[in-house]
Image (cartoon, rainbow, N blue to C red):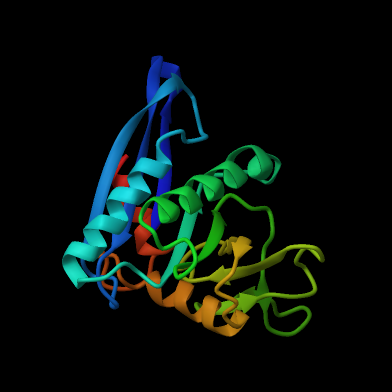
Amino acid sequence: CGLDVFHATNLGKKSVLALTASMNNSATTFWSTSVVQDDVGQEASNNLCKGMTNAAEAFKRSNGTYPSQIIFYRDGVGEGQIEGVCRPEITQIKQALANAGVADSCKLMYINCSKRVNTRLFAGEPGKYQNAQAGTVIDGEVTEKDTYEFYLVSVAARQGMSAPTRYAIIYDDIKASPHKVEHLTYKLCFTYYNVSGAIKDPSVIRYAHRLA
């Protein structure tokens, strides 16, 4: 699943929340919905529970059963907003699973995606630095000690300096290995239909961004 919220506060318009969910194993078929938020500039969602319930029902109609695992990518939440935005959203997702009767059988992983980061990664020898190659992952040394996070360079920069995307796993009861999570995230950067190669973030987030 992917979630993004679009703001147009300068125009005085209410924010729009967009949710996408893949319906097959290859992440090529999607269900989506969008909701106008209650207030101007509102980042936190009060409608996610309903959206996730509908997504779970759509998955069951397509596959004959509810999903056994949900990996949820959230875009646009700053580090200072984790407790106020991400934690309540995790609670709403759990409530949606409870509404579907799969709270115990469906595992959840919630990943916060941040593209606006100051961290830069380099390859090469001292004095001969160059941009990191596409597919470079850093999950230690420069990451937070108390947070399960990693930096991924999914697109090679043709000009200027490449910037990684930061992924922080806020909640996880799937307990997959870091290698599998990082590999999946990188592969999802290749499934956006408008681009033949990779993009900077997983396609589920980009679809949600376009919808919002």
Residue drawn at point x = 40 percent, y = 55 percent? 2
Q: Residue at x 45, y 70 (%)?
A: 105
Residue at point 45%, 77% (across, down) = 184
Q: Position of residue 109 (x, y in %)?
A: 53, 65
Toward which corner of the image does residue 165 lie, by quadrant?
A: bottom right
Locate the N terminus and report the quarter of the image it occupies: bottom left
Name the outermost residue toward the left.
62
Q: Is residue 199 visible?
A: yes
Quadrant of residue 123 within the rendered picture: bottom right
Q: Is residue 122 left or right of residue 93?
A: right
Q: In what quadrant of the picture does the C terminus appear?
A: top left
- Place of residue 140 in the rendered image (x, y in percent of width and height, measured from the top left): 75, 75
**Residue 208 appears in the figure:** no
Q: Nearer the viewer, residue 108 or 178?
A: 108
Image vertical order of residue 162 relative to residue 177, above or below: above
Q: Residue at x 64, y 69 (%)?
A: 150
Front in this rendered view, residue 137 or 173: 173
119 left or right of 201? right
In the depicted structure, whether residue 12 falls above or below residue 179: above
Q: How many marks?
A: 0
Q: Residue 135, how many percent across, how many down? A: 51, 79
* Residue 153, above or below 85: below
Query: Farthest top residue?
Result: 12
Q: Nearer the viewer, residue 162 or 184?
A: 184
Q: Position of residue 181 (x, y in %)?
A: 53, 76
